[in-house]
Image (cartoon, rainbow, N blue to C red):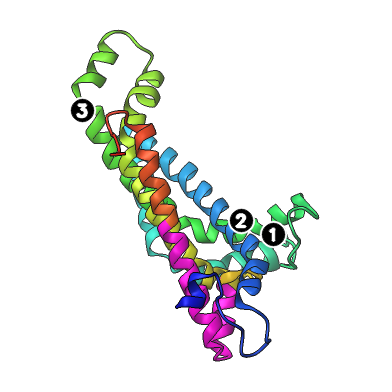
Amino acid sequence: MGRLAHGDLGTSWRTGKPVGSLILERLPVTLELTALSVAFALVLGVAAGVVSAVQRDRALDQVARVGTLFGLSIPVFWQGTMLILFFSLYLRWMPPVVWVDFLADPRRNLTIMLLPVVCLGTASAANVARTTRACMLDVLRSEYVRTAAAKGLVRRVVILKHALKNALIPVVTVAGLQAGILLGGTVVVEEVFTLPGVGRLVLWSIYQRDYPVTQSTILFIAVMFMVINLAVDLLYRYLDPRIRYAS
């Protein structure tokens, strides 16, 4: 524990390298995958949730609700396998997954990341969409939203400026939790798409019985989850000026 407090995560039994250096080598891949997946989930989920709330009980609402149900029901490993079979092997639209660093070739890197991001972010997008829809429906029934509409404001302004911002706090909370879940989900996705990230390092260490690497990588993911949730708590103040933190 004393060595851990000084940043010493131990040494790999298999390679003899410091565990910290092994994690740092693979961390950029996992961070990129998680960040892109969160962005994908937020963009798709918030948009679907807003449209579903505004078009309540209409065709678009029904399509969005069915889509979220499918997104939550499909296992990540099956979805990843189907995406590879369909887009890479059948249609040949996607290149073979031979990892290329973003700085070396940004376009090829993002092309390689496209399918893993869709696979990892689908369930999170469904969760965000459901939360956004519920919060928007509640806010749209509020008196200040009705007042803004009665004053003659454009409907788009009422929805995006007055309703959406006040509905975002629960959405941000869910997004923070989903970011932590996505960090854990990288274990499966990185293995399916052969991405050299921290998640695949966890599986490799389990297969090899390399317990120092297993313990340290899981501890590292847990700490990152805590940091993300702290950042979400700090973001509340920006979204709701009524929130104040004690100094």
Viewport quadrant of the C terminus? top left
Q: Earlier in the sequence, mark 3 or mark 1?
A: 1
Assess disc 2: are there few (<14), some (14-19) or many (≥20) residues with their C-alpha within 10 Å of its C-alpha.
some
Side of 103 relative to 247 (left or right): right
Assess disc 1: are there few (<14), some (14-19) or many (≥20) residues with their C-alpha within 10 Å of its C-alpha.
many
SS for dot 2:
helix
Side of 198 relative to 148 (left or right): right
Q: Do the residues labelled 2 and 1 touch (CB within 8 Å)?
A: no
Check the image and report above or below for 65 versus 71.
Answer: above
Residue at horizontal 38 percent and vertical 42 percent from the top: 234
Viewport quadrant of the N terminus? bottom left
Q: Are marks 3 and 1 in contact (CB under 8 Å)?
A: no
The number of discs equals: 3
Assess disc 3: are there few (<14), some (14-19) or many (≥20) residues with their C-alpha within 10 Å of its C-alpha.
few
SS for dot 3:
loop
Cα–Cα span, label 2 and label 1:
12 Å
Q: Name the residue under label 1.
A: 112
Which stretch did the figure color magenta?
199-226
Q: Mark 2 points at which residue?
A: 32
- Which label sits on residue 38? none
SS for dot 1:
helix
Q: Which amino acid does label 3 sit on?
A: Arg
| x and y percentages locating residue 28 in the rendered image | 64, 60
Q: Name the residue under label 3.
A: 141
Cα–Cα span, label 3 and label 2:
39 Å
Residue at horizontal 65 percent and vertical 90 percent from the top: 14
Q: Do the residues labelled 3 and 2 touch (CB within 8 Å)?
A: no
Predominant SS along the magenta part: helix
Residue at horizontal 61 percent and vertical 59 percent from the top: 115
Q: Which of marks 2 and 1 is nearer the N terminus?
A: 2
| Magenta span includes 207 | yes
Q: Which amino acid does label 2 sit on?
A: Glu
